[in-house]
Amino acid sequence: MKHLIAPSILAANFNNLEKDIEVINHSEADFVHCDVMDGVFVPNISFGIPVISQLKQVARKPLDVHLMIIDPDKFIADFADAGADYLTVHYEVCNHLNRTVNLIKEHGMKASVCLNPHTPVAVLEDIIGELDMVLLMSVNPGFGGQKFISNTYKKVSQLRNLIEQSNSDCLIEVDGGVKYETGKKLFDAGANVLVAGSFVFSSENPEATINNLKAL
Ligand SMILES: O=C(CO)[C@@H](O)[C@H](O)COP(=O)(O)O
Ligand SMILES: [Co+2]
């Protein structure tokens, strides 16, 4: 089973983002996780397309862009141009999820769908075969540094079963409150990609923390 790490730059130093991207570049991280928030779908505003295109110039790992915005279809072309490699949309805002997923792929990106903590895995039954990744939120989206919701372990196992039944190679990513203990249990339950923000960037040695997560 693949074990991948996606440090979230929401917890990085915005006065010197390049320095933290270099930490990620030098580490064993697999992706750079970028949280885009619109202040409507979630009660917070982070950063958007211009920041992503600048990051793309310094990041040597694929950009894993997590859109927490309403009406994502409107911006899919812009995120592709900015250099997103994986584009994640929230199930809760997509009335025509199949169309949105197709649009992401037509723009050359990997398609990923995110479920909020209260959204059951079963809603993906009829689309799982089309997805490159599913992102399970293990906190309510909008902020870093929140407490992990332990119902997520059960959802990881359910999703792993769904993926196996559909014979797909879709990745399972988990986002929110990931530390060594939660991360280890998530990998054991069948997760492939761990997002970690505050745990990495508040640690004394972010590069070592990334590498330790990868080795769990
Ligand atoms: O999408 C989000 C929050 O909405 C995350 O990607 C956070 O950035 C994770 O932060 P930590 O919980 O790891 O501090
Ligand atoms: Co995120």
Image (cartoon, helix red, strand yellow):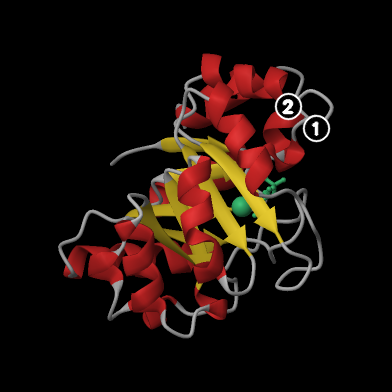
Residue 154 is at least partly visible in this image: yes
Q: Residue 70 versus residue 195: which sits nearer the camera? A: 70
Element carrying mark 2: helix
Label 2: how many Cα within 10 Å (few below 14, some 14–19, many 20+): some
Q: Residue 209 versus residue 35: which sits nearer the camera? A: 35
Q: Residue at x 32, y 50 (%)?
A: 108
Q: Residue 106 versus residue 158: which sits nearer the camera? A: 106
Across and down, in percent, residue 196 comes to: 62, 41
**Amino acid identity at mark 1:** Phe
Q: Is residue 123 left or right of residue 118?
A: left
Across and down, in percent, residue 172 comes to: 39, 55
Q: What label sits on residue 5 in the rendered view?
A: none
- Write down the quadrant of residue 24 in the picture: top right
Residue 8 is at least partly visible in this image: no
Residue designated by label 1: 14
**Amino acid identity at mark 2:** Leu
Residue designated by label 2: 17
Element carrying mark 1: loop
- Cα separation between marks 2 and 1: 5 Å
Seen as rendered, the residue at the extreme bottom is 95
Q: Residue at x 38, y 60 (%)?
A: 104
Q: Residue at x 65, y 50 (%)?
A: 35
